[in-house]
Structures are given as structure tokens and as C-alpha cells.
Amino acid sequence: MTYPDWSSLLSRLYRDGPKGLVVVLAEFTDLVAASSELPSVLRNHVDTSTGNVAIAISGSSQSMMHSLVLDSLQPLFGRSTELLRLTPMWIGWMARALSVEATEAAVEAWSVIGGVPRYWELFQGRALWEAVAERILDPQGPLHPRAGRTLYRIADPFLRFLFHFVEPNRSQLEAGNLDLVLARVRSALPGFVGPVWEDLARASVPRLGRFAGNYQPAARWWGSTPTGSVELDIVARHTDGQRLLVAEAKRTVQSSEADGLLRHLETHAARVPELAGQPHEAVLFVLNGGTKAWNHPRVVGPAEVIEALGGEAKLDRRTDVCLPDP
């Protein structure tokens, strides 16, 4: 059936839509760009129509969506009943969507593409580095950044990856030297993954099964002390308000090193005036440690972090991974 305009379609939906029908107008800003009358038409139906239809509008540009709905000069002002701000999904869901069972490989993939499901779709069925080359580094790839176009905030791992690896190598990529840039990325990625692992470890603290939800959201602490500067990757207060968790995120730790690193962490924490005298638990978050290190009672591995952030992780020692279609 053909509807000649938006009013015809909305009239039919409001008139004949079954009870509980939800109509989602996705990428609403693009629809408005093509049909500027749409907000006014939609307002008229919202104001005058009766029926069982709920309308949801969504768009990628947060500022434009806010303008269309919250600006008093816009037709849809005052018509919204609820505003939802969707955030990226966590690493556990990415690992499940892409069937990534190697926990270290899952953190690598997350470091590259982050939590936007559309990116996951573009990586399905390809080995990680093949997808990086074809989808991101290739100037014709769908995720290659276009000059002057910035869509996502820097906290997003994917955008962080673009600014770290793609922008500095743009001239080489435009010259067709994709293999050269890919080799640079593969060589530098381990160092790039470190801060991403720290972010994931910090985010997992309130959700980790071993802590049973007993810790509040974690933060980083840094500052000066009477004996010099101190930086702690992770600090969280227990829900009882009386105890603290102090932790350090490490990319690689051998099992023989764990106890020494924990003692060093405890010494550092004791130098912080705000933490001195408070009971605390010292923990290491270790990305690459092997079974012996991860079995240490005060070491948290990537399997626990990924499980806490939305997925069930299995230990698998593969160093590269193919991301198959689900």
C-alpha cells in the first residue's frame, strides 16, 4: 500500500492500529531533513487523534533531537512524555554478539569498536584485523572518518581508536599504504588497550560477583602526599561506608609477581592521607596473566570483568579471533 504523505500514514496508524501498537520513527532528524513538515504533522495527530498508538522518535544527533523536542519554538515542544538517552552497550554483550570466547581478544575488540551495535554488525564474520583494515583504515570503509565529521564523544572506545590511529596516519591511508598503517596499529595496540582495560575494570567494580554488589562506583585517585605524588587506578567505598577497595589495572602480570605488586599497592594506598587508617582490600585487575595468576584470590581476570559487564566469558588462549555471524 502506498501512502502519499506523512499525514495519510499517521491517520491510518492512529485509526486502525491495534491496542499497544508502538511506532518508532528511527533517525528522525534525517526524516525531518527530507520532510520539514513532519514535526508539525506529527504534533497535529498527537494533539487531535485518539487511539492506542504510541509514537517513539529516535536519532543519532543528541543536540538535534533535543532541539526538535525541547525547544519551545519547535512544533513538538511539550508533547513528549518520556526522554530516553541510550548509551553504548557493555563489553559482555559485544562478546556474546560476536561469539568472542577469548577474553583477552574480547578486550582488544572492545578497544577498537566499543559498545555501538552497528559497529558490531560491520565486524561480524571477519577476523579482527581483517575487519580493522577493511572497515576502519580503508578510506572507502564504512567506519573510516570523513574530514570534519565528528559524531561520537571521546569516551567512546571507537572514537578514541580513530583519533589515536587513523587521524595521525590519514595521509598514508589516502596514499594507499593500508598494510603499513595496519602493521603500526597491530604493533601499538597492546599499549592502547591498557587504559581501556583500566576503564573496564573500574566500571565492573559495583557489578563483580566476588564483591556481591557491596562496593559503590569506583573512581581514579591521584594527588600529592607528604612523601610524593600517588596515583591509584581504582578506589571504591564499601556500601557500609567503613571500608575501601583499592586496585590497580595491569595489562600483563606473571603469577610470581602478584604478591609483590599487591604489597606495593598497599604501601601506596597507605601514603594517601584520605585513605590512611581506613580498612581496605587491595586487588589487581590483570588482563594477561594466565590461569595461575587469575586463580590468585586477590586477582581479577578478564572473564570476571566481561561477565560482570553483560556477558558470560570462557577462557580461551587463542591470540587472534574470527568474529563469526551469530
Image (cartoon, helix red, strand yellow):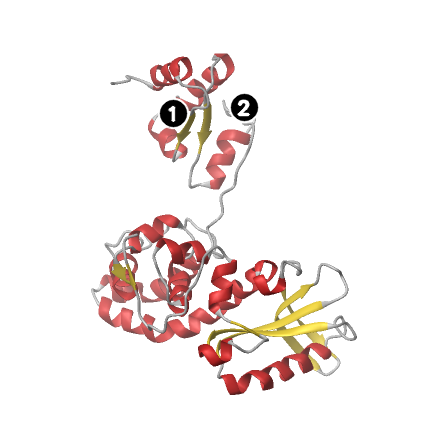
Quadrant in the picture for residue 95: bottom left
Q: Position of residue 83 (x, y in %)?
A: 54, 34
Query: Is 57 displayed left or right of 226 in the figure?
Result: left
Q: Which residue is mark 2?
A: 79
Q: Position of residue 138 (x, y in %)?
A: 25, 59
Q: Looking at the picture, tell me which residue is in the foreground, 138 or 202.
A: 202
Instruction: Please tell me the numbered disc located at residue 36.
Output: 1
Distance from disc 2 to disc 1, alpha carbons, whole Å, reads 18 Å
Asked if residue 163 shows in the view, the reply is no
- Is 313 drawn above or below residue 40 in the view shown? below
Number of numbered labels in the structure image: 2
Q: Amino acid at mark 2?
A: Arg
Which quarter of the rendered picture does the N terminus lie within?
A: top left
Asked if residue 103 shows in the view, the reply is yes
- Is 67 drawn above or below residue 117 in the view shown? above
Instruction: Please tell me the numbered disc located at residue 83.
Output: none
